[in-house]
C-alpha cells in the first residue's frame, strides 16, 4: 500500500490537510506519533468520518491539491473546497483535477468564487453544501453544466452577486433554486439555467426559483431560463 507520513502544507491549508494518508491500518499505527493501545482500537476509536482523533489520519481520502487561492480534498465520494479566495477556472482543454465521479460537494466559508467549468459534467453529483459559505460572490460560467444536482440552496450566501453565463446549463434534474437572503445578487447570466432542445439538455424539472424580497437584481440574461417549462 502507498502511504504518506507527512504533507507539505506550505501551499495548502484547511482542516483537511494536516492529516496522514494511509491505506493500511498497521502502517498507520506504526507511523502515528500518538498511537495508543492496539491497532484496531486506535483506528476505530475515531470520529464518524473515520478520522483518527490522535493524528487525523483519514483512511478514505484519495487525492488533494490546490485550486486558485483554495484547496481541494477528495475523500471517498465527497469533494471539499476550502480556503480564502477564488477557485481556479477550468476548460474543456484543462479540466478540473478532481474529475467528475464524486457524489457530494462541500464549499467552505472563505471561498469567494466557484471557478468556470469547475464541476462541468459531474453526472454523479447529488448535492452541494454551501450552507457555511457566506463569502461566496460569484458562480463561474458553466460551473455546473450538465451536472445532476436536484436542488441548490444559496440562502446563506449573502454576498452572492453574480451567477455567470451557463452556470447551471442543461442541469436536467435541477428542481429548485433558493436565492432568498441574497440581497446583493445583481446578475443572472445568459443561459444560466437554460438548456438545449433535447431531453438531457433541458432544465425541464426546474419548478421553483426563490429570490430575496430585498434583492438588487438588475439583469437576467437572454435565455437564462430557456426550456424551464415547469416554472
Image (spheres, rainbow, N blue to C red):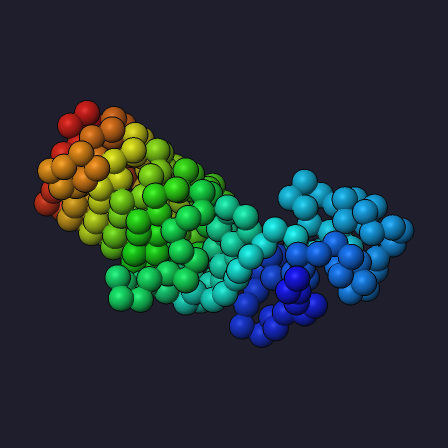
Side of 107 relative to 150 (left or right): right
Residue 113 appears at what percent x and percent y? 36, 57
- Residue sitting nearer the eye, 130 or 226: 226
Determine whether 208 is above or below 166 in the image: above
**What residue do we see at 68% from left, 46% from top?**
50
* The N terminus - image quarter: bottom right
Side of 77 relative to 92 (left or right): right
Residue 180 appears at what percent x and percent y? 34, 35
Residue 147 appears at what percent x and percent y? 32, 43
- Residue sitting nearer the eye, 92 or 186: 92
Q: Residue furthest front?
A: 1
Determine whether 93 is above or below 118 in the image: below
Quadrant in the picture for residue 22: bottom right
* The C terminus - image quarter: top left
**What residue do we see at 58% from left, 54% from top?**
61
Q: Is residue 162 visible?
A: no
Side of 25 relative to 208 (left or right): right
Quadrant in the picture for residue 211: top left
- Residue sitting nearer the eye, 229 or 24: 24
Q: Is residue 132 visible?
A: yes
Q: Which residue lies furthest to the right in this view?
A: 37
**What residue do we see at 66% from left, 67% from top?**
4
Determine whether 168 is above or below 83 in the image: above
**What residue do we see at 61% from left, 73% from top?**
8
Residue 171 appears at what percent x and percent y? 26, 40
Amino acid at each position: 500500500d502507498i502511504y504518506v507520513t507527512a504533507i507539505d502544507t506550505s501551499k495548502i491549508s484547511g482542516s483537511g490537510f494536516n492529516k496522514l494518508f494511509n491505506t493500511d491500518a498497521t502502517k498507520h499505527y506504526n507511523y502515528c506519533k500518538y498511537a495508543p493501545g492496539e491497532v484496531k482500537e486506535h483506528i476505530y476509536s475515531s470520529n464518524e468520518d473515520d478520522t483518527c482523533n490522535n493524528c487525523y489520519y483519514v483512511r478514505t481520502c484519495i487525492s488533494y491539491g490546490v485550486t486558485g487561492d483554495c484547496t481541494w480534498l477528495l475523500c471517498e465520494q465527497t469533494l471539499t473546497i476550502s480556503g480564502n479566495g477564488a477557485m481556479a477556472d477550468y476548460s474543456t482543454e484543462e479540466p478540473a483535477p478532481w474529475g467528475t465521479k464524486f457524489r457530494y460537494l462541500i464549499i467552505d466559508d472563505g471561498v469567494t468564487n466557484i471557478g468556470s467549468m469547475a464541476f462541468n459534467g459531474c453526472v454523479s453529483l447529488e448535492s452541494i453544501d454551501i450552507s457555511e459559505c457566506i463569502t461566496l460572490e460569484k458562480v463561474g460560467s458553466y460551473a455546473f453544466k450538465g451536472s445532476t444536482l436536484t436542488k441548490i440552496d444559496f440562502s446563506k450566501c449573502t454576498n452572492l452577486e453574480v451567477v455567470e453565463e451557463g452556470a447551471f446549463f442543461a442541469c436536467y434534474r435541477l428542481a429548485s433554486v433558493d436565492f432568498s437572503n441574497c440581497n446583493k445578487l445583481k446578475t443572472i447570466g445568459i443561459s444560466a439555467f437554460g438548456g438545449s432542445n433535447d431531453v438531457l439538455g433541458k432544465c425541464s424539472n426546474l419548478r421553483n426559483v426563490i429570490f430575496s424580497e430585498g434583492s438588487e437584481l438588475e439583469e437576467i440574461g437572454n435565455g437564462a431560463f430557456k426550456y424551464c417549462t415547469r416554472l
